[in-house]
Amino acid sequence: ENSYSSEVYKSTDDSQRKVYNKWVREYLTEKAVTDDFGSAKTSKGEDNFISDLSADTKSFEYIVLTGDMYPEADTVSYLEGHKDLFQSVSFKRATYATEEEAASALSAIATGAKTIDEAISESVGTDGTDYGTFETVYRFTLDNYLKSTAPETSAEIFASASSSLVGPVSTQSGYSIYFMESAAKDADPSSADVISVVKGYISQYDSDVMKAYLEAKAAEVALEAKDDFTATAEKYDLDVYTVSGAAENPGESQFIAGLNYLDANGYLSSAVSADASLSSTLFSAPEGTVSDALPSGSSYVIARSVENNGTSSYYASILASMYPSSAVSVSYSDFQNIVLNSDKTEDNFFTAYLNMLTASMGTN
C-alpha cells in the first residue's frame, strides 16, 4: 500500500491496468498541480502592496439630477397628450390554473353563487400580483402586464363599467377574472402622485424626451455649481451625498476600498463604472474642483472633491485581511476553470513530466 509493486502490477488484468493508467495520466498529475495552486500563500510584500492600494484616498460630495426635475408644466402637457395611458381603474382579480376553472368561477360570481373574494381565496399564482384587490391601476401598467398573453383585453377592462366582470383572461400564471371596483377615470393633473407617475413613465418609456431635458439642465446646473456648489444644491433643493476616504479603483477590484464600496447611494460609483476615464479625472482633481455633469444611469451627477478625511480604515482593513485567502482561491479557480478547461490548453503534462524526469536521471 502507498508504494509501487511491479509484481502487483504484472498480476493485474489488462482492463484494470488501463483504468490505473488513465487515472495516473488524467487525474493524479492534474490534482498534484491544482493542489499546489490551492496551497500557495501570498507574500508579505504582496499583502502590503494590496493594503497600500487603499491608503491613498479622496473624499467627494455630489448632487444628483433625476427625472423628478422635469418641469411640472411640461409633465402636464405630456399627460394631456397621452390621456389614455394615464387613465386608471380599480379591480379585484382572481386567477385559476385552467380556463375551465376560471369560466366556472366567472359564471358562479355572475349568478351570485360565489363572491369575488371567495374566488380570490381559491387563486393560484407566483406572487400577490396575480390576484387580490388593486387600487389605481394605470392603463400603461395593465398594458404591460397583459402584453404577452392578452394585449387586447386591457382595452376591454378599461371600457367596462363598475361592478362588471371580465374574463377569463390568459396570463402568465393561468387564467384570470376581473371584477371592476370602478370604471376608468382620467388622471388628475393637479395631483402630486399623478405628476410623479407621469415623470416616471417618461423616464422609463419615453427616455429620449427625458434625456434631452436632463442633459441640457444638468449642463446648466453644473455651470452654476462650479461657481457655488452649496448654493446650487440649495437652489434646486438637491440632497448632497458624501463619499469619504475612497481609493481610486477604476478596475473595480474587490480588494480596494474604492467608490464601489464607499458610495452608499451608488450614483457616483455608477458614473465611474460606466466610463473608467472619469476615475483619473476625479481622483487627480485638486480639492474644491467641481466636475461637469456626469451620466449615471438615467440621471446626472455633479461631484466636488472635498477635504479628505483619510483612509476608510474599516473597509481597508477588512479587504486587506480577506486578500491572502481570497487571492489564492481566485488564482486556483482561474487556473482550473480558465486554463485547464480551455480548448486551447494542450494536455501534454504527463509526457513533459516523463521527459523531464528522464533527462534528470540521465545527468546523474
Image: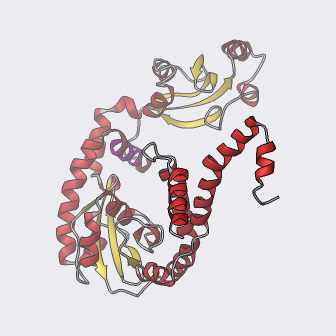
Q: Look at the picture and state if 175 lies above or below 201.
A: above
> What residue is shown at x 77% (from left), y 20% (from top)?
114
Is 224 displayed left or right of 303 in the figure? Answer: left
Residue 22 location (% of width, % of height): 65, 43
Quadrant including the C terminus: bottom right
Quadrant including the N terminus: bottom right
Residue 244 found in image quarter: bottom left
Question: Principal SS element in the magenta part?
Answer: helix
Nearer the observer, 114 or 214 = 214
Residue 125 found in image quarter: top right
Nearer the observer, 36 or 162 = 36
Q: Is residue 319 magenta?
A: no
Residue 184 location (% of width, % of height): 48, 28
Is 241 displayed left or right of 134 in the figure? Answer: left
Q: Is residue 202 magenta?
A: yes
Residue 131 found in image quarter: top right
Is 310 displayed left or right of 153 in the figure? Answer: left
Q: Look at the picture and state if 197 lies above or below 14.
A: below
> What residue is shown at x 43% (from left), y 32% (from top)?
140
Residue 213 location (% of width, % of height): 22, 50
> What residue is shown at x 43% (from left), y 81% (from top)?
49
Is 141 displayed left or right of 217 in the figure? Answer: right
Q: Look at the picture and state if 119 lies above or below 284.
A: above
Q: Which residues are magenta?
A: 194-203
Nearer the observer, 120 or 10 = 10
Name the image colouring: secondary structure
Nearer the observer, 177 or 38 = 38
Residue 96 location (% of width, % of height): 69, 22
Q: Look at the picture and state if 276 lies above or below 26.
A: below
